Image: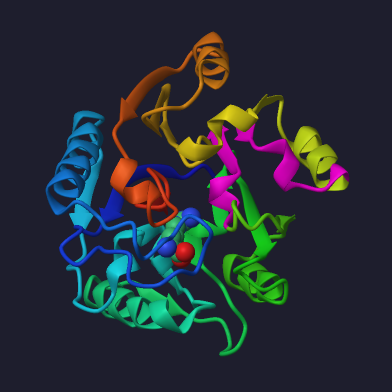
């Protein structure tokens, strides 16, 4: 059954800062400009509202600087919230706040056993009636069987083993309607073939797009929202297949290793 996205969850950058390094983008010397990040957040929220998405916000918490990357809190499907088990201890409490938030909203909470890692929509997508999961750097391969049990369907999975693109959503962006943007060098040849089998149109990111997280984008109908800086090749391919592009400044969020998609938890609901 097709599921629409009408609602997204964001987390304001009240306590966002680079306080530790858990991916190669992060450098504790590279401080976040609070003024700039507030305006980047506001602009993203405004774009979503313009696109008729309901924006919900979870309160930021002191001591959890990466909580801004709401996509990682879990996965929302119908009235179910699958809670994340973060690989890094620095982020684990974020999932408890998300559990509380979704419980209060009336969602059923599902959990993966302790010690098996799962990083929510950082590594899991639902598009065109299919579930896609990444495993390796963050989510454990073992998590997949629990996910399949919860959603009652097989997931199509890929190994994510690129230090720079450590979540599936940093190197793979299914847009709907059989289209996907990928960073080909993040995947094994076998997985690239699997992607080609599952999508009608595969848009390839270029090396020059690397500093701009060009796969960390979000699509809605015929619109794609990307961080500013994505190269002209990817943009022209997107335009060719009929997308309007909203480019928005994400410079401060790149410092933590994320962009548009990492900041956004989509609700998939029938
Ligand atoms: N600093 C965060 C981490 O390393 C960034 C998370 C980005 N989120 C994403 N969905 N890729 O965990």
Classify residue 170 as left or right of residue 140: left
The quarter of the image that holds ligand 1 is bottom left
Question: In this orientation, which residue lies closer to the viewer: 233 or 78?
Answer: 233
Q: How is the image coloured?
A: rainbow
* View extreme (front): residue: 29
**Location of residue 195 (image quadrant):** top right
Classify residue 43 as left or right of residue 206: left
Could you tell me if residue 75 is visible in this image?
Answer: no
- Residue 80, above or below 254: below
Classify residue 88 as left or right of residue 12: right
Residue 185 forms part of the magenta stretch: yes
Q: Residue 1, percent across and down? A: 55, 46
Q: Residue 116, percent across and down? A: 62, 83
Residue shown at 35% from the left, 60% from the top: 70
Residue 195 forms part of the magenta stretch: no
Classify residue 10 as left or right of residue 245: left
Residue shown at 21% from the left, 65% from the top: 58
**Location of residue 205 (image quadrant):** top right
**Location of residue 176 (image quadrant):** top right
Q: Which residues are magenta?
A: 167-189
- Residue 268, above or below 143: above
Q: Residue 30, percent across and down? A: 33, 56
Could you tell me if residue 203 is visible in this image?
Answer: yes
* View extreme (left): residue: 35
Question: In this orientation, which residue lies closer to the viewer: 107 or 198?
Answer: 198
Q: Residue 79, percent across and down? A: 38, 65
* View extreme (bottom): residue: 114
- Residue 233, above or below 109: above
- Residue 82, above or below 173: below
């Amino acid at each position: 059954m097709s599921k629409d996205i009408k609602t997204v969850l964001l987390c304001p950058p009240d306590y966002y800062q680079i306080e530790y390094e858990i991916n190669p983008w992060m450098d504790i010397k590279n401080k976040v400009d609070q003024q700039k990040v507030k305006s980047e957040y506001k602009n993203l929220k405004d774009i979503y509202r313009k696109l008729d998405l309901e924006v919900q916000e979870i309160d930021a918490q002191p001591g959890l600087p990466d909580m801004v990357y709401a996509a990682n809190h879990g996965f929302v499907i119908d009235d179910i919230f699958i809670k994340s088990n973060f690989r890094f201890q620095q982020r684990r409490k974020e999932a408890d706040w998300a559990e509380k938030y979704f419980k209060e909203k009336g969602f059923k909470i599902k959990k993966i056993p302790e010690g098996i890692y799962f990083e929510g929509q950082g590594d899991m997508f639902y598009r065109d009636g299919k579930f896609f999961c990444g495993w390796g750097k963050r989510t454990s391969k073992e998590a997949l069987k629990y996910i399949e049990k919860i959603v009652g369907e097989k997931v199509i999975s890929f190994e994510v083993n690129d230090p720079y693109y450590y979540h599936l959503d940093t190197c793979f962006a299914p847009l709907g309607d059989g289209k996907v943007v990928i960073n080909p060098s993040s995947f094994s040849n076998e997985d690239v073939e699997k992607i080609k089998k599952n999508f009608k149109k595969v848009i390839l990111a270029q090396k020059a797009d690397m500093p701009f997280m060009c796969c960390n984008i979000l699509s809605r109908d015929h619109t794609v929202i990307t961080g500013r800086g994505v190269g002209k090749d990817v943009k022209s391919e997107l335009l060719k297949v009929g997308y309007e592009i909203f480019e928005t400044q994400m410079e401060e969020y790149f410092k933590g290793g994320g962009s548009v998609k990492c900041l956004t938890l989509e609700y998939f609901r029938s």
